[in-house]
Image (cartoon, coloured by chain):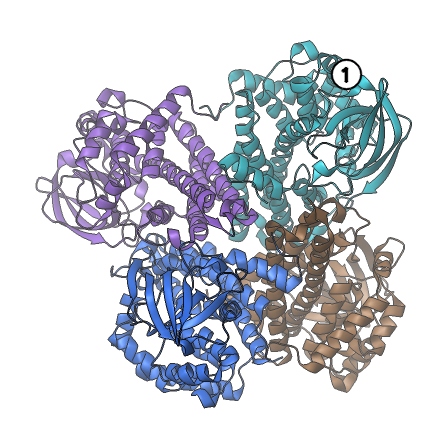
Chain colours: A brown, B cyan, C purple, D blue
């Protein structure tokens, strides 16, 4: 039992923090969030690939190196720096490929991703099916040269850059345990229409309209044996996604705590720093407890996943706690910054948006609490 | 006690509703949704129409253009405006005018009150400065008398209506040697006076606020409100009224009702949102809080009509309602799940994006008008007799 | 619309407050809570009857005078003074009699209660049926000279003093709408066994074992027409009970707020009153908001009931809010008093117990929230 | 990182469990349930048996009778004792002994540590005085050196173990002229010394505490711990350890697990409690909080084993866990509805009355060991570098 990062882990985190500080300054973050940008920086991407971060948590046989926990530590730093969402969406896709793809697909896709040659994403959610796979309606039917996909996916991050986009579709009716298949849809495939969604975090989510989209037999992730059998891998991958999302939130929350501490130490009213007022101190202390708990719960979830322990409860606990703590930190930061933190030229709102968007992603608090209840046997 | 409207109050509410059904046009609604707190020709026209009803002086004396009704009637009016999604009464009406009525000279009253009730004058609040926020009494913008004119120099921030108002309701230091609370006065300054520069600041809530610079701005001596160096009391008094105005619930109740409605007709994952126990419990808790919030607002109106300025109760109302605004926006966005992050410009946005908008607007109301931390100390000190915090 | 008490209402409250201060000092409260006492003071009772308080909210035709709101104002003061629970239990019974009894019963029972000649109570809850009338199992079957009751009731306040005890029983199987009847069981009736329950507030609640308890036909509250038809009156009475319980809580909460304010004004640490510390001030301010909200929500519920408006939502809101606010005030009071308020010789814990017991009585917070949800049409 | 026990730690835990299965007899369990925190012959015998295992010095050096294991092993021991419902380690072991190890003279160590590890000495904490509670450094009980003896006069309050312990760990003023934090020393005083009077104070939680009066009490000079007038540092150090001890979660987790079990087999109103969504949500939230609480305690043990005294983290652990105790007791009593108010003496009491008992015990842990308000300021100031509050 040792809750502190090992020297290697600490070094990795430190290195990621320093690199992002240098390579992903707030000026770049703001540029990438702007309407002129595609929301992705190839330069930054290349640097991340060079550090080996895009292979973390992925099979060594296919170019990966390092554990899911290592990936989490880098993702944490990416949350602190507000690195664009292509990092998260691509690693999510990579983890699904690693869990479900056959040797050839892993070799190709994991290889391309870990060497920084591909941005990817998973299209799971649909307008009426947010979480529950029983209600997914996107269909794939056999066609002349493989499969034909039809349906609507929504809240798909970086669909405009994903190559391939991994689409979860139904290949038969009935229980999802025997009906779901994942397809690799290359960028530019005919019949795919992207409609950007106006998310308040400007994080490039899309409605993806699939209208008779033809893909080859090779597009089935996991090959013929995986047709209709993708659900366990999807569920397993989603747990990892949630844990990584938590890591991203931990980094953001820590940054908000630091920004707020700095501000209340420096801001003088009534002749003294406002950080000397008890009410302010106690708000900051509550933020700090939230952040500390987030970090511990998230590391535990990542560690359990990385070490193949049952992790469903730990993951749900981490998301339920961390979502609330991160968002709560931003809400309180606004209170303590007052007008100074409320103007758009101050960066604070960028984390506030990230916090709320992350809280909503992959199931907000009640969704996680019900998962915990289920794990308690209730 | 009487927890229902009197027949006269019901009639008043119906009159307001009837007015709104005629004047709150679909075009205006669209503009309001798009613009939020900003103004536009249609919005300004609507405000003029409200003022033309005499409603910018509901509870002001008839002699100054008012209707001589009660604070309760003003609250009913505000609640209806908010619930309908119309612009509410400006602070000039709810918070500043009452100070002129109470503390202004006869000249002040004649100069300004009819202008306000006719909808021809609105005042931007010129209080905060970069180094005088919560510690407002440290303000340094100064006014010096030069013959029959005040000469004003200094700088204000968070001056939200400066680009829309006709005048500044400006807090200035008129005696640099007095203790900090004792050397402050309030002067009304035409916004188009030479020497005023307005620079926009855009906020996360998409509300524009401003920095305003005053360089040798000259205004007539008579623009001073009440007595010289007594401004702190007018500011504090106006803040009590402002807190009540920040603590009204019409827009919150509308957002909640629309959320309940949305939950009743929206199905995710095979289940209507309103069927889900976790949604039911959250909505029920919000309903409890909203009810109490509404009772707080009715209580301060009751107390005002009984002749007081309810400092403790107004602070409670402000704290509770503004924090409830955060809670409603926060919980609401969670209840509608991923749809809670969509901006109004997205046709899929739940409640036309009003939840995420409310979420972004909420911080402002918690620290604006006196931070909720200051409010809590006021409740403890003025309401319960605790000694001054140090 | 006028949320302030009228001069008459204020006078009544003031008068009750002063009388309880004189007639129900803490020394008496402690004596009555002690194991030597039966938990009731005939002296105090006589004085309350003389003031007319035992007839408040009851029909004028039978000796009552004043509205339910008036009763609420006196009950509020009784909560402040920790007047024994016989007041609440007796008025609960009286309200049920007023709602369900026939003329003769009202005349006799309301008359006796309002003139201070009877203490009474209602036996509703059973070990496995706390709220829902569908699960009540106590049976009454026709016997030689009337009815025979059998079953177990629990959490019955003052069953040892109640004369009569009003017992809600099932006279047929099936839906409670057509099955429930209320019986007046005189004190000392054969077959009734009382087992005191060790409640932590020492508020005299009993398990009541009914083993072939014979009562006459005249014991049916409301007479023959009311056999199997008691449910609406019971539901209606329970709403009033809840509102009165809220009033009692408001008085207790207000007292706790005042005690705490006094304490933090007087207690000096670090050379100044602890009430000058922001953290303390903000705790007290939060308590005050809770209490103020409790008062307003409770008055609204009482007013609506007293004026025959639909009140189910208001009542549930009042209980949900007030239970939390009162309990929360006691929890925070303990924090601010520290050890000084934690010793048994300090009175604070008496309100803490009253707060928790009241929160649990007649449905805790979640129970009320689900009622609110139902009123919202969810 | 490693979020699981090492094989050695698992073995250690099994050893503790095995011990408990043999020594925590049904008779002892009954006494513990009836007596709570108080002692009895059976309880004292059990404590002696624990000490005989060497477990009153788990992570102390072998030379002073310890087992030289880690803080993590001590935490595992405490968690198991608490979860099983056994008495935990006394503060003498978890909080005071470590101060002697760090700051005591060689004579101190030889005098006291073996006595403690053999279970022959326990110290009552003699800190608070009627006018020196949170402001502990204002204490006035004084000790004056008279030849080879200290003469002690004064009065202590909230001296909870005074009627059970063998000695007082007494904070006294030894330099009345120094600044208030600089004139304090710690002296160990045999509880049976002439001149000591102990008066009981009974608390709402049914824990007995005491007022203790010292009148010309004489103890040998060598009973002073560490250096004269340096006592404040030992007290503050001991408090950091005490906070960790107050923030352990074994008993809370047991209460929660038993509550979940109760909900699974209890039916009210035709429905098992655990089927109810509102109960599920509350239990789930408690499970989340308990997990974090447990992680806080594992974190401070990790940091201690890395060689530090984790002031910020221990304060977080104390604040969070003690407030969670209130929440669990509060929510638990609500979940079991009317049964939540029954005392253990009632056979119908849910969880043998442990919920209402926990509810009454909870306040003490929030203000004891340094109020949670002080803890929050410590987190802000020492943890995050905020300036000292004023």
C93 above or below D223? above
Q: Quick check: can you spot residue A238?
A: yes
Residue positioned 30% across, 53% down in the render: C200
- Name the residue located 43 percent from the left edge and 85 percent from the top edge: D110
Is the residue D254 above or below the residue C70 in the image? Answer: below
Q: Residue at x 42, y 83 (%)?
A: D113
Residue sticking out furthest to the front: D147
Quadrant for residue A227, please give it: bottom right
Q: Position of residue D187 (x, y in %)?
A: 42, 72
- Taking the image as shown, residue A97 lies to the left or right of residue D233, namely right
Q: Nearer the viewer, residue B286 or D217?
A: D217
Q: Outermost residue, bottom direction? A: D63
- Asked where in the image residue C294 lies, by quadrant, the reply is top left
The residue beneath circle 1 is B115
Viewer-side residue, D255 vs A148: D255
Q: Quadrant of the N terminus of chain D?
A: bottom right
Q: In the visual, does B103 lie left or right of A376?
A: right
Q: Nearer the viewer, residue D275 or C311?
A: C311
Question: Residue D73 location in percent, x, y?
Answer: 49, 82
Give the crowd class for mark 1: few <14, some 14-19, many >=20 residues within 10 Å.
Answer: some
**Secondary element at image label 1:** helix
Residue B193 to residue C229: above or below:
above
- Name the foreground residue: B271 vs B128: B128
Provide residue A16's location: percent of width, then percent of height. 78, 73
Q: Is residue A46 left or right of residue C218?
A: right
Residue D24 visible (yes or no): no
């Amino acid at each position: 039992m040792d809750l502190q990062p090992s020297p290697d882990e600490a070094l990795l985190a430190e290195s990621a923090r320093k690199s992002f500080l240098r390579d992903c300054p707030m000026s770049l973050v703001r540029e990438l969030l702007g309407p002129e940008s595609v929301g992705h920086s190839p330069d930054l991407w290349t640097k991340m690939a060079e550090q080996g971060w895009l292979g973390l948590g992925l099979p060594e046989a296919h170019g990966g190196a390092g554990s899911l926990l290592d990936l989490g530590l880098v993702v944490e730093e990416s949350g602190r720096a507000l690195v664009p969402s292509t990092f998260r969406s691509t690693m999510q896709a990579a983890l699904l490929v690693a869990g479900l793809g056959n040797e050839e697909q892993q070799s190709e896709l994991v290889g391309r991703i870990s060497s920084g040659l591909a941005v990817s994403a998973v299209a799971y959610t649909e307008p009426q099916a947010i979480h529950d796979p029983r209600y997914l309606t996107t269909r794939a039917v056999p066609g002349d040269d493989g499969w034909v996909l039809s349906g609507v996916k929504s809240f798909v991050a970086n669909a405009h850059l994903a190559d391939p986009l991994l689409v979860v579709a139904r290949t038969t009716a009935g229980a999802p345990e025997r009906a779901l298949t994942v397809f690799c849809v290359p960028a530019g495939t005919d019949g795919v229409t992207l409609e950007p969604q106006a998310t308040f975090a400007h994080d490039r989510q899309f409605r993806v309209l699939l209208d008779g989209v033809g893909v080859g037999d090779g597009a089935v992730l996991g090959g013929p044996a995986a047709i209709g059998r993708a659900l366990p891998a999807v569920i397993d991958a989603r747990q990892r996604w949630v844990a990584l999302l938590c890591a991203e939130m931990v980094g953001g929350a820590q940054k908000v705590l630091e920004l707020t501490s700095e501000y209340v130490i420096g801001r003088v009213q009534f002749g003294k720093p406002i950080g000397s007022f008890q009410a302010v101190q106690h708000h900051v202390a509550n933020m700090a407890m939230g952040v500390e708990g987030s970090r511990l719960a998230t590391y535990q979830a990542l560690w359990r996943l990385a070490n193949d322990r049952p992790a469903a409860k730990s993951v749900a606990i981490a998301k339920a706690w961390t979502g609330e703590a991160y968002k709560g930190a931003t809400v309180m930061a606004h209170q303590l910054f007052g007008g100074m933190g409320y103007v758009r030229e101050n960066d604070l709102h960028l984390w506030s948006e990230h916090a709320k968007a992350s809280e909503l992603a992959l199931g907000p608090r009640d969704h996680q609490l019900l998962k915990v209840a289920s794990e308690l046997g209730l | 006690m009487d927890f229902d409207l009197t027949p006269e109050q019901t009639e008043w509410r119906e009159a307001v509703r009837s007015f709104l059904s005629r004047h709150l046009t679909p075009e205006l609604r669209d503009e309001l949704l798009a613009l939020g707190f900003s103004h536009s020709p249609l919005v300004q026209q609507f405000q003029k129409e409200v003022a033309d009803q005499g409603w910018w002086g509901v509870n002001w004396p008839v002699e100054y253009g008012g209707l001589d009704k009660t604070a309760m009637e003003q609250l009913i009016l505000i609640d209806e405006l908010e619930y309908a999604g119309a612009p509410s009464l400006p602070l000039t009406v709810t918070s500043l005018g009452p100070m002129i009525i109470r503390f202004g000279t006869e000249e002040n009253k004649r100069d300004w009150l009819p202008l306000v009730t006719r909808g021809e004058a609105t005042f931007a609040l010129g209080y905060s400065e970069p180094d005088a926020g919560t510690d407002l009494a440290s303000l340094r913008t100064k006014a010096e008398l030069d013959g029959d004119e005040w000469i004003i120099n200094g700088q204000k921030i968070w001056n939200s209506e400066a680009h829309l108002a006709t005048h500044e309701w400006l807090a200035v230091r008129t005696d640099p040697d007095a203790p900090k609370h004792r050397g402050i006065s309030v002067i009304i300054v035409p916004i188009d006076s030479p020497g005023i520069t307005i620079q926009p600041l855009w906020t996360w809530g998409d509300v524009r606020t401003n920095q305003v610079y005053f360089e040798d701005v000259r205004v007539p001596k008579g623009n001073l409100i009440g007595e010289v160096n007594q401004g702190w009391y007018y500011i504090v008094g106006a803040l009590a009224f402002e807190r009540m105005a920040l603590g009204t619930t019409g827009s919150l109740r509308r957002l909640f009702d629309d959320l309940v409605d949305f939950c009743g007709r929206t199905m995710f994952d095979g289940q209507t949102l309103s069927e889900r126990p976790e949604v039911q419990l959250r909505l029920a808790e919000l309903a409890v809080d909203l009810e109490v919030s509404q009772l707080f607002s009715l209580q301060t109106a009751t107390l005002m009509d009984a002749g007081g300025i309810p400092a403790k109760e107004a602070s409670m109302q402000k704290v509770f309602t503004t924090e409830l605004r955060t809670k409603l926006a926060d919980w609401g966005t969670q209840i509608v799940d991923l749809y809670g992050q969509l901006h109004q410009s997205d046709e899929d946005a739940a409640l036309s994006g009003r939840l995420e908008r409310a979420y972004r607007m909420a911080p402002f109301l918690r620290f604006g008008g006196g931070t909720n931390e200051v409010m809590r100390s006021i409740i403890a000190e003025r309401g319960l007799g605790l000694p001054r915090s140090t």
